[in-house]
Image: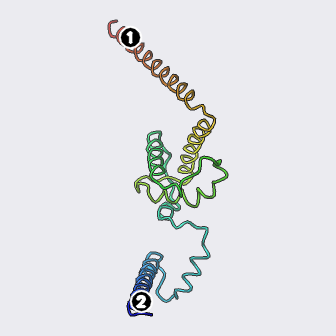
């Protein structure tokens, strides 16, 4: 090797050893934080902790789950349901496609992936003041998937224009119907006020 190659090789080795030291330091800090959070005493060896962590693989490590564990929550009001739905939809829209669901597959085909990846990601990104059960979040995700899958199917069939037109006509008809109801109510109030 030439002098320049040897120097480059030594620099790479020192960078690798520096990265390894940083990783060891990070693992040590995380282990200390884990001990502090779980309340286990320091006499346990790190091997025992690793074994205990790996034996509970099915348990989600989401902080939201541990916070709400065993809590009985009050029933949801319609406005709270809307708030939850808006929050979950916004979070899912901002997540990467790697975590989000696939509209070309049915919900039941990817339910395991949704429960393991998407649900913890949504819960971690949610506003901490919104406390709900996992089933409520999954129901919102299921409704969103159904809606987006229906639109995807319509797009695949090439009927998106007719669907949009029909949806617009229905929406306009509902607006006119509500407007007529309001006008009738106003007339009744005026007649009642006169009498």
Give the class, few, some or many, for how many residues have Cα within 10 Å of label 1's Cα (few <14, many ≥20).
few
Q: Position of residue 110 (x, y in %)?
A: 64, 54
Q: Position of residue 80 (x, y in %)?
A: 45, 43
Q: Residue at x 56, y 85 (%)?
A: 48
- Relative depth, front residue between 39 and 178: 178
Measure the alpha-carbon separation of dots 2 and 1: 92 Å
Residues tagged 2 and 1 counted as in contact (Cβ below 8 A): no
Q: Quadrant of residue 59?
A: bottom right
Q: Residues within 10 Å of mark 2 (few under 14, many from 20)?
A: few
Say the numbered circle drawn on residue 5: 2
Q: Nearer the viewer, residue 170 or 69?
A: 170
Residue depicted at x 34% and y 10%: 190
Give the image location of residue 97, x and y in percent. Answer: 52, 54
Taking depth in this image into account, of 73 and 3 the one nearest to the observer is 3
Q: Quadrant of the C terminus?
A: top left
The label number, if any, that marks residue 69 in the structure image: none
Instruction: Name the spot of residue 122 as percent of width and height, x first.
Output: 49, 55
**Above or below, 187 relative to 55:** above
Mark closest to the chain's N terminus, 2 or 1 = 2
Q: Which residue occupies the foreground of this view, 176 or 70?
A: 176
Q: Relative to residue 45, is residue 80 depicted above or below?
A: above
Q: For residue 176, which quarter of the picture?
A: top left
Mark 1, secondary structure of its residue: helix
Mark nearest the camera among 2 and 1 is: 2
- Label 1: which residue? 187
Image quadrant occupied by the N terminus? bottom left
């Amino acid at each position: 090797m030439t002098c320049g190659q040897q120097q480059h090789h030594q620099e790479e080795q020192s960078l690798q050893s520096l990265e390894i030291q940083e990783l060891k330091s990070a693992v040590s800090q995380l282990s200390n934080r884990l001990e502090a959070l779980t309340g286990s005493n320091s006499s346990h060896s790190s091997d025992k902790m690793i074994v205990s962590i790996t034996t509970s693989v099915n348990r989600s490590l989401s902080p939201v789950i541990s916070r709400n564990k065993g809590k009985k929550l009050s029933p949801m009001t319609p406005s709270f349901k809307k708030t939850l739905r808006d929050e979950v939809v916004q979070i899912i829209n901002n997540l990467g496609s790697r975590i989000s669901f696939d509209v070309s597959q049915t919900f039941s085909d990817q339910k395991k992936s949704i429960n393991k990846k998407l649900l913890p990601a949504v819960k971690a990104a949610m506003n901490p003041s919104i406390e709900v059960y996992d089933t409520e979040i999954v129901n919102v995700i299921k409704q969103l998937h159904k809606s987006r899958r229906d639109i995807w199917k319509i797009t695949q069939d090439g009927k998106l224009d007719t669907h949009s037109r029909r949806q617009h006509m229905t929406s306009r008809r509902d607006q006119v119907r509500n407007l007529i109801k309001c006008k009738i109510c106003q007339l009744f109030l005026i007649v009642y006020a006169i009498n």
